[in-house]
Amino acid sequence: METFVLDTVYIKLETGKVVTGFTTMQIKYEKPDGTFGTWEAIEHPEDSTSLRTSARVTCADKGSWRAQAYIADADEAYHGKPAEFKVYSSLN
């Protein structure tokens, strides 16, 4: 299923690393206009190597978005490979 402007969705990203026990879990994003932000994330309930946004998020801007998993604790920090997804305009 595609994502449309103002849809509320969970974002899931594969990290390639078991995320259990990390104290910081975030999904960093870049909006189509080039601005950046972060969503708080949790370990995916069915996959310990994936992050999922902790709440549904609303993508209010159409265009190409980039998202990247980020996990950290006191001794180490990791970024996942950036993923791109598109948000489309819906019919009025």
Image (cartoon, grey):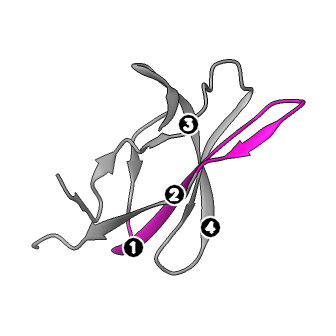
Mark 3 to mark 1 CA distance (whole Å): 24 Å
The earlier-in-sequence mark between 2 and 3 is 3
Mark 4 to mark 1 CA distance (whole Å): 13 Å
Residue 27 is left or right of residue 3, and the answer is: right
Mark 4 and mark 1 residues within 8 Å of each other at the beta carbon: no
**Crowd rating for badge 2 (residues with CA inside 10 Å; few <14, some 14–19, many 20+):** many
Residue 73 within the magenta-colored segment of the rendering? yes
Q: Amino acid at mark 1?
A: Ser
Residue under numbered circle 2: 67
Q: Residue 77, percent across and down?
A: 79, 40
Mark 1 to mark 2 CA distance (whole Å): 10 Å
Residue under numbered circle 3: 16
The earlier-in-sequence mark between 3 and 1 is 3
Vertical order, 50 against 30 (above or below)? above
* Label ID, residue 36: 4
Q: Amino acid at mark 4?
A: Phe
Residue under numbered circle 1: 64
Residue 83 within the magenta-colored segment of the rendering? no
Mark 2 and mark 4 residues within 8 Å of each other at the beta carbon: no
Q: Which mark's residue is nearer the viewer, 2 or 4?
A: 2
Q: Which mark's residue is nearer the viewer, 3 or 1?
A: 3
